[in-house]
């Protein structure tokens, strides 16, 4: 297992963007950049041994700030939406930036995706590992408490990439971190979409949303709906079902699924298979929910790696996280973090191949 420090260009203000490449002996490698503690590339062999990049992103560091699509980044302090950009904690009201219509999304302009994280350590061994750290001061973005955050990426010889987020706070606050990678297991995204990828979700229910993509509070069974992925189904099989109000509201899939099993325990959340390349992604997580997003807002105006134009459905996001708007929904699993406690969220991406 090997690590290598590299550079990923510089930002408009002259700051350099360091990066670390992790690689194993099977041809799998991942490039993690300090900007947004992001997965910039993830290269995996297919059934014929051909190695290709299976995540969307940019070749230029500046694009991550100029045209943010959250490609591969760490999103926080709170991933997803908070209704009205406000919440109450211990009787105190807090107001956040409204950057998604009337709502707050992914931490706003001071979100962790826009921060230049510090590469704290890099190590070889049974696992190639990089640890990144970010300090968010009390009140940043409207959030209470100074937050000390680490993101650890580890790659092993079994083609497993593990992401672990940890955080501590100086005051009671809310925390919800995740990785926002867009996967296309065919590789070299932009030439093909993910509509024929076969998806399995280990979730018996999801949380419907209103017209502003805020959960209504209902927990709805997936049975008999286009949201039933308990058995492998092609992503695009029912995505254009106009009779389903939730698909119309989301312009496709942009919904939180309630992962089966107790939160805090690492358990299966999703399985994604590309029938063409044979690549398989198994995702395990400790978070209570999993946001399925079918790239609905990629409209052909974003030019990504190798000059490819990204369009709707060119990538699929599987984001383990707390339920959207949990700070305003006491019936949802809590996202509260108090001083003396440690927030821990683990995501495991396990890659394999199937025979043709």
Image (cartoon, rainbow, N blue to C red):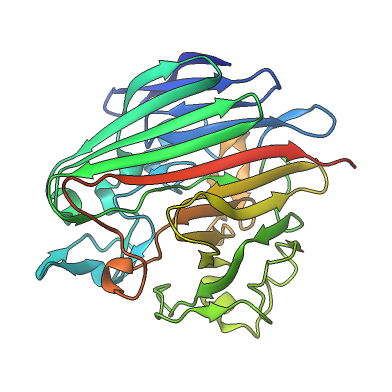
Where 37 sits versus 289, above or below?
A: above
Return the x and y of residue 32 as percentages of the image width and height. Answer: 47, 29
Where 305 sits versus 234, above or below?
A: above
Left or right for 310, reference 17: right
Q: Which residue is pictured at 82% across the width and 42% down the height?
A: 354
84 or 93, nearer to the observer: 93
Q: Which residue is pictured at 61% across the width and 58% down the height?
A: 312
Q: Specify the farthest residue to the left.
A: 92
Return the x and y of residue 345 as percentages of the image width and height. Answer: 40, 46
Q: Classify the position of the C terminus by image quarter.
A: top right
Say if residue 39 shows up in the picture.
yes
Snapshot quadrant of residue 34:
top left
Where 222 sits versus 93, above or below?
A: below
Left or right for 84, reference 245: left
Q: Which residue is pictured at 52% across the width and 20% down the height?
A: 128
Say if residue 60 shows up in the picture.
no
Q: Which residue is pictured at 60% across the width and 48% down the height?
A: 283
Left or right for 211, reference 46: left
Q: Specify the farthest residue to the right.
A: 356
Left or right for 135, reference 348: left
258 or 254, nearer to the observer: 258
Where 105 sits versus 218, above or below?
A: above
Q: Classify the position of the N terminus by image quarter.
A: top right
78 or 265, nearer to the observer: 265
Return the x and y of residue 162 as percentages of the image width and height. Answer: 52, 36
Snapshot quadrant of residue 132:
top left
Snapshot quadrant of residue 351:
top right
Return the x and y of residue 194 as percentages of the image width and height. Answer: 70, 53
């Amino acid at each position: 297992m090997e690590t290598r420090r590299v550079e990923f260009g510089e930002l408009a203000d002259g700051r350099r963007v360091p990066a670390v490449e992790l690689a194993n002996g099977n041809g799998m490698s991942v490039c993690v950049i300090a900007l947004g503690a992001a997965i910039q590339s993830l290269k995996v062999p297919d059934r014929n041994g051909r190695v290709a990049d299976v995540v969307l992103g940019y070749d230029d560091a500046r694009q991550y700030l100029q045209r943010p699509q959250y490609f591969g980044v760490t999103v926080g302090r709170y991933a997803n939406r908070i209704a009205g950009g406000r919440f109450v904690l211990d009787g105190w009201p807090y107001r956040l930036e409204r950057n998604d219509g009337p709502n707050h999304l992914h931490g706003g302009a001071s979100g962790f995706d826009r921060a230049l994280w510090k590469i704290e350590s890099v190590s070889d061994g049974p696992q190639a590992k990089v640890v990144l750290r970010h300090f968010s001061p009390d009140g940043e973005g409207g959030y209470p408490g100074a937050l000390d955050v680490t993101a650890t990426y580890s790659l092993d010889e079994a083609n497993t990439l593990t992401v672990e987020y940890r955080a501590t706070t100086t005051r009671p606050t809310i925390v919800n971190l995740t990785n926002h990678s867009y996967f296309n297991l065919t590789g070299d995204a932009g030439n093909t979409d993910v509509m024929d990828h076969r998806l399995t979700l280990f979730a018996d229910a999801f949380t419907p949303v209103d017209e502003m993509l805020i959960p209504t509070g209902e927990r709805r069974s997936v049975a008999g709906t286009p949201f039933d992925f308990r058995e492998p189904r092609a992503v695009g099989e029912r995505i254009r079902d106009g009779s389903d109000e939730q698909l119309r509201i989301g312009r496709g899939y942009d919904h939180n699924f309630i992962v089966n099993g107790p939160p805090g325990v690492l358990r299966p959340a999703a399985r994604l298979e590309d029938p063409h390349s044979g690549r398989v992604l198994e995702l395990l997580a400790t978070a209570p929910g999993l946001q399925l997003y079918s790239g609905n807002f990629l409209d052909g105006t974003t030019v990504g790696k190798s000059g490819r134009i990204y369009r709707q459905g060119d990538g699929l996001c599987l984001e383990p996280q707390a339920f959207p708007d949990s700070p305003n929904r006491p019936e949802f699993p809590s996202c509260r973090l108090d001083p003396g406690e440690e927030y821990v969220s683990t995501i495991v991406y396990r890659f394999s191949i199937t025979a043709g």
